[in-house]
Image (cartoon, helix red, strand yellow):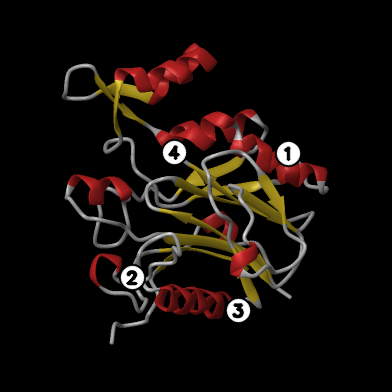
Amino acid sequence: MTDTGLQTLIDRELSFIRGVRHGFFTRNGGVSDGIYASLNTGYGSNDEAYKVTENRQLIIDSLGATSLNSVFQVHGKRVERVHRSWAREATPRADAMVTNKPGIAIGILSADCAPILFCDPKARIIGAAHAGWRGALAGVVEATINEMCEMGAQSDSIIAAIGPTIGPLSYEVSETFLEPFLARSQKNAVFFREASRAEHFLFDLPGYAISLMKDLGLDKVSWTGHDTFADNERFFSYRYGHIHGQPDYGRMLSAIMIEK
C-alpha cells in the first residue's frame, strides 16, 4: 500500500495565527496510484472515486476538521459564503469560498493554477480562492477579498499565501495571451518576459496575483515559491501531463480552517 504520510507545505505568516490551521498539500501521501499517485483529491479526474474520498479524508484528519468543502471550479470569480458543510452532489459552481464557521475546512483544487489562502486573524474570517489566469483576470482575487470585507474583515488585516503554482520560468504563453492583460493595464507588461521561442513569453502568475492583492491593501502576501511544472515528483501539473502525453492528471488540495 502507498505510504500515507502526508507531505504538507505551510506558510509562515498563516502558521503564526492561533486557532487557524492550513496546509498546501503536495501530491504525496495518499492512496491513489498510476498517474494519480498518490494524494489525488480531484473527483473531476478519472481516478477511482473511493480513492479520492479516502485521500480527502486523510486531509480532513490531518487538519482536525469536521468536514471539507470544495467547489466545482469554473475559472470565474464567483465566491461562495460557507455556512455549513455540503455533500458532494450539492457542490456549488464557484472559484472561491469564505467563512467564519469553525471546524469546516475550505479547500481549493489545483494543478498549475494558483491556490490562495486568506485569513483576517482579528475578524476570524478565512478564504480560499482558485486563481488561474482566467480567474485572476476575471477578478476572483478581488471578489474573495471583497466578500471577506463584507463579512467584517479589513483588507489591511488580511494575510494571504499562494501555494504551489506554475512558476514564472515555466509558464510559456503566446503573444496573443498578453492582449487582455495589457488591455486591462499597460503596467501588466512587467509580468511577462520574452521566452526562447519567437513570439512567446513567460508569464508570472504568482507575481500577478500578488500585485492584485497589494493593490487592494493587503500587506502580508507571499508565495511558497514552488513551481508545479518544474517538480513533478511533488506536484500535479496539468501542463506537465499534457506535454508528456498523459491522458489525465491529478489535483492537489490547499485548505484552511478555523479550529473549534
* Whole-percent x, y for residue 259 in the image: 69, 72
Q: CA distance from mark 4 to mark 3?
A: 29 Å
In the image, is 192 to the left or to the right of 106?
A: left
**Which residue is identified by label 2?**
28
Asked if the residues shown at circle 1 and circle 4 are in contact, with their CB atoms under 8 angstroms apart, the answer is no
* Residue that protrudes farthest toward the front in the picture: 89
Which residue has dot 1 on it? 146
Residue at 24% from the left image edge and 62% from the top image edge: 233
Mark 2 and mark 4: Cα distance apart in space: 23 Å
Amino acid type, mark 2: Asn
Name the image quarter holding residue 99: bottom right
Crowding at label 2, few (<14), some or many (≥20) Cα neighbours within 10 Å? many
**What residue is disc 3 on?**
64
Residue 186, percent from left and from top: 48, 12
How far apart marks 2 and 3 lie (CA) works out to 19 Å
The earlier-in-sequence mark between 4 and 3 is: 3
Q: Quadrant of residue 86?
A: bottom right
Label 1 amino acid? Asn
Task: Tell whether 97 sits left or right of 47.
Answer: right
Whichever of callouts 2 and 1 sits on the residue coming sooner in the sequence is: 2
| Mark 4 nearby-residue class (10 Å; few <14, some 14–19, many ≥20) | many
Label 1: which secondary element: helix
The residue where tag 4 is placed is: 206
Q: Residue at x 51, y 41 (%)?
A: 75
- Whether the residues at callouts 3 and 1 have beta carbons within 8 Å, the answer is no
The kind of secondary structure element at disc 3 is loop
Alpha-carbon span between mark 3 and mark 1: 28 Å
Location of the C terminus by quadrant is bottom right
Disc 4 marks a residue whose amino acid type is: Pro
